[in-house]
Structures are given as C-alpha cells and as structure tokens.
Amino acid sequence: MAGKENSVRREFGCLTKVLFAFFFLLGAFCTNLDRLGSLPARLAEMERQVPWSIRRLLPMPKVPYGTSEKGTALAGRIIRVYDGDTAILLDEAGERRYRVRFYGIDAPEAAQTSGSESGDYLRNLIEGKEVKLEVMDVDRYGRHVAKVFLGDRYVNLAMVRAGWAWYYEAYAKNDAELAGAEESARREGIGLWSRPSPEPPWEYRRRK
C-alpha cells in the first residue's frame, strides 16, 4: 500500500513540475509579445526553413485571406509556391494572405513531366522574398492574376524565358514580350523544351 502511495506522490510531483513549466513559459511568451513583431510573418519565416517535401504537408499560418481588385498593387513576401505559376503572398503587415496566379503564363501541373522542376525553379527564385504585384484580374477561384516583380525582375517573363512555363495566349492576348520569350526558350531547347513534344498544361487538364 505504501508503495502505491509513493508512486502516486511521484506522479503528482511530475505533473506539478510539468504544469509549472508550462505556465512559466506561457507567462514568458505573453510578457514578450511586443518583441515578436508580426507573429504570422515569423511563423512563415520558420516554416520556410522546413524542407519542401515536409512543408507542403503543413497547414498555412492562421492568417485570413484578403481580396483585392483589378488594377490594384500588392506587396509582401511569398510564403509558399505551389507550382510554376501559383503562390501565396503574405502582405507587408503580416495580416492578410493572397492567392496569386501568375498572369500570362501556364506552367506544367505538378503531376506532369517537368512539373516538379518548374515549381522548384519558381520556388528558388521567389519563395521567402519580398515581391510586388500588379493585379490584372481576380478569377473565380479568388486568385489574384498578377504580374509579379522581384525588384526590377519580371518573374512571369523569367519563368517563360527559362523554359519552365508556356506563354498563356488565351488569357494574355498579343503579349509580344511573353511570346518572344517562349520562342527563344523553344529555340534554345531549355527547361521543359529540352524534352520532345511537351504537353501544354491546358491540354493535360482537359484530359483529366
């Protein structure tokens, strides 16, 4: 009987220590909230340190989605790249997320040949970095169809020029700059054009 009582005391003592540690840490956290800056932005930065293979399975920071309008400008940090033409922007205040669909280009779907390479190229180019957006439209899925700029670099054009996206003529009529970039990439046989007869993603989606 005495042994059982001693065991209960030890367990109670351990529980007391755990609770004390928890409340001590909670108090320290609350006391220093003013030093944390934008918590969502910090969480996004921490998430960026996790390998993509794991990060893609994690939930997004609990920040509400925002909606802008055609013709507006947005600025912030790219906190996640899904594929070669889709990403998530966290605004400068760390208060809103925006779904971004890159204007005028169409990259291979993740399941397509070259899909992972296209996504990796865009991820290495802009993920975790500050960008500016010119919103050209907001589509039916709530995505901000935008021209994306990393400093002076036009990222949409960079994707086509590197051969990791098509010029999406159906949604960007008469864009000579994007059309010329695709012709150049085809000629040089770079990116997805290094493989014979790559299937355009809009045809791939039609089959699915």
Image (cartoon, rainbow, N blue to C red):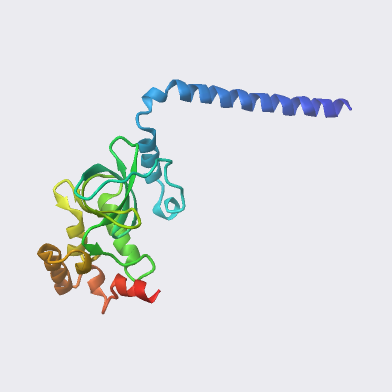
Q: Quadrant of residue 72?
A: top left
Q: What residue lies at 30% left-to-right and 57% top-to-bottom?
A: 139
Q: Is residue 121 above or below residue 93?
A: below
**Residue 173: percent from left, percent from top:** 15, 66
Using residue 88 as the reference point, say whether residue 61 is left or right of it. right
Residue 33 against residue 103 in the figure, above or below: above
Quadrant of the rendering where the N terminus is positioned? top right
Q: Which residue lies furthest to the bottom in this view?
A: 197
Q: In which quarter of the image is residue 182?
A: bottom left
- Provide residue 28's location: percent of width, then percent of height: 48, 22
Q: In which quarter of the image is residue 174?
A: bottom left
Q: Position of residue 23 (x, y in %)?
A: 57, 24
Query: How many numbered marks appear?
Result: 0
> Residue drawn 40% across and 40% down?
63
- For the point 31% across and 63% down, which residue is it? 117
In the image, 47 versus 61, the foreground residue is 61
Q: Is residue 164 left or right of residue 43?
A: left
Which quadrant is the C terminus positioned in? bottom left
**Is 78 situated above or below 105?**
above
- Please tell me which residue is depicted at 35% across the width and 32% down the height of the picture: 38
Query: Visible in this render: residue 75?
Result: yes
Q: Which of 145 and 180 is in front in this view?
A: 145
Q: Is residue 98 above or below residue 145?
A: above
Q: Can residue 167 be seen by looking at this rendering?
A: no
What percent of the width, then of the height, locates residue 40? 38, 37
